[in-house]
Amino acid sequence: MSFSKDFLWGTSISAAQAEGGWNEGGRAPVQVDFADVGSASSSGRHLIYKKKDGSKGELTGAYAMFPHLPEGGEYASFDDVYYSNRKASDFYHHYKEDIALMAEMGFSTFNTTISWARIFPYGIQGGVNQEGVEFYRNVFKELRKYNIDPIITLYKYDEPIYFEQTYGGWSNRKMIDEFVKFARVCFIEYKDLVNKWITFNEINVLLLFRNLPHNQKIAQERYQELHHQLVASARTVKLAHQINPQNKVGCMMAGMCTYPLTPDPVDVMENYKYFQDIFCYATDTMIRGQYPSFAKRMWKEDEVEVIMTDQDLKDLKEGTVEFLGFSYYMSQCRTTHTDANMTKGNIFTGFENPYLQKSEWGWQIDPLGLKYYMHYIYDRYQIPLLIIENGLGATDQVEEDGSIHDSYRINYLREHISAMKEAVEEGVDLMGYTTWGGIDLVSASTGQIEKRYGLIYVDANDKGEGTYKRIKKDSFYWYKKVCESNGEDLE
């Protein structure tokens, strides 16, 4: 059995990483608007803020992605810092051109996010920003014009700074009502344009950073923030079905495929425990409607007490999702042995697998791991899967004639789609596949646009210099064949 006739082919981007227009159309700033640009050799990027004494401060790593500013700190701009997310790929001004190029590739779907800061720049109290509502309406109309069925994510690493300044972010359960109100506006305004939704992107990554370094206060915050997001998601799922019974709502997880580095039973147990903690804790809750049995073990180990109400538990039970979206870029190993070599990843690190090659940014390439992972999670959950992110970040060279020969990207995608196809033929229910990302965009981990993922080149560098002209890469023409043949032509 090959891909079904209604299989969805397309690509994914996000508002924070591609849209730009950070201070246009009534949009308010989001946290990542204050992050700088890292590099392939650096440990990541920094969130830049003004210290109490007026000097420049930096948050790194996990603290840059999910920031709580130190006491007295303020979000501020510095002239000597380039903030790459503020313009990103400039999709805000190029969306018609970009969507036309997607249609040329034969896309049947497109995943992007709605920036909360465009709809409610200053929360419920500040009211709806109609200009932002109309922007997304125009985007979705443009997609429908080309018969592209959008899959829309409501939240992806782009909390408006208003909520951090007003409530302290997701640690405050008032954020639940704020998010549900935001979702309600989206479901009503786009009822005739969108019927496939994802509540939170990679919601499970919050726990990835719960003890880096080990800190009980941070762990308590992360668990509580995640609980509030899980409840917000559940209430949103119920609301989506009330507003439009045709709506399908899924979750989206960071796919973290890992293997035990050795046959040591301790490594095997360590690997499975990691899968439980980082993937299943949130996924079980969103699909099965309750926290898994091993949650008590996690809470005890991390010395936390998640505050929850009876209504929260009722909402979780009633607001389960209908499909499981996930990202997949690589695999890593887990071990308890201290002589192993660490390896890089998108937002998590592990240990090197000696049988795998690495990308330019040190990510281990493992197409067979995708097949394995699809079987592994489908066997557990038995609901349709959706691959939301899969792609290769690499440096691309524009030739003198304007061509871009990215055979490395084609090879990466070909091998992963082939593995994906085998999993489908072996019984995995997969509803669609969207590459990351259709156009070059800003990397979440490093802030670079020169770490290019796109099938479409954006003429811009890591300093924001360039024409932002769009250029078709060789992978553009290759993926067009894949989409038009429903995955049959991979040559």
Image (spheres, helix red, strand yellow):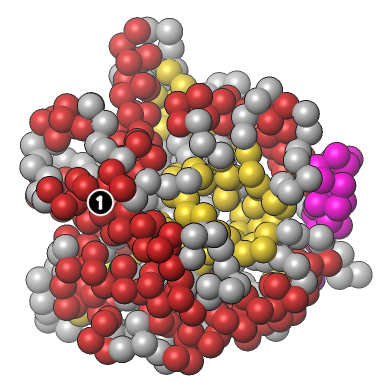
Residue 462 in the image: state x and y as whole percent.
56, 71
Residue 52 sits in which quadrant? bottom left
Where does label 1 land, which residue?
315
Q: Residue at x 40, y 89 (%)?
A: 129
Q: Give the secondary structure at mark 1.
A: helix
Q: Residue at x 42, y 82 (%)?
A: 118
If the image is split into quadrants, where does the N terminus sit?
A: top right
Q: Residue at x 38, y 70 (%)?
A: 183
Is residue 391 shown in magenta? Answer: no
Residue 443 in the image: state x and y as whole percent.
52, 60
Nearer the observer, 139 or 94: 139
Residue 266 in the image: state x and y as whole percent.
31, 11
Give the crowd class for mark 1: few <14, some 14-19, many >=20 residues within 10 Å.
many
Quick check: 257 above or below 224?
Answer: above
Q: Is residue 390 left or right of residue 302?
A: right
Nearer the observer, 299 or 262: 299
Q: Is residue 322 left or right of residue 193?
A: left
Q: Is residue 223 left or right of residue 265?
A: left
Residue 142 in the image: state x and y as whole percent.
69, 78
If the image is split into quadrants, where does the C terminus sit?
A: top right
Q: Is residue 388 visible?
A: yes
Is residue 478 shown in magenta? Answer: yes
Q: Residue at x 91, y 70 (%)?
A: 401
The residue range painted magenta reads 471-491
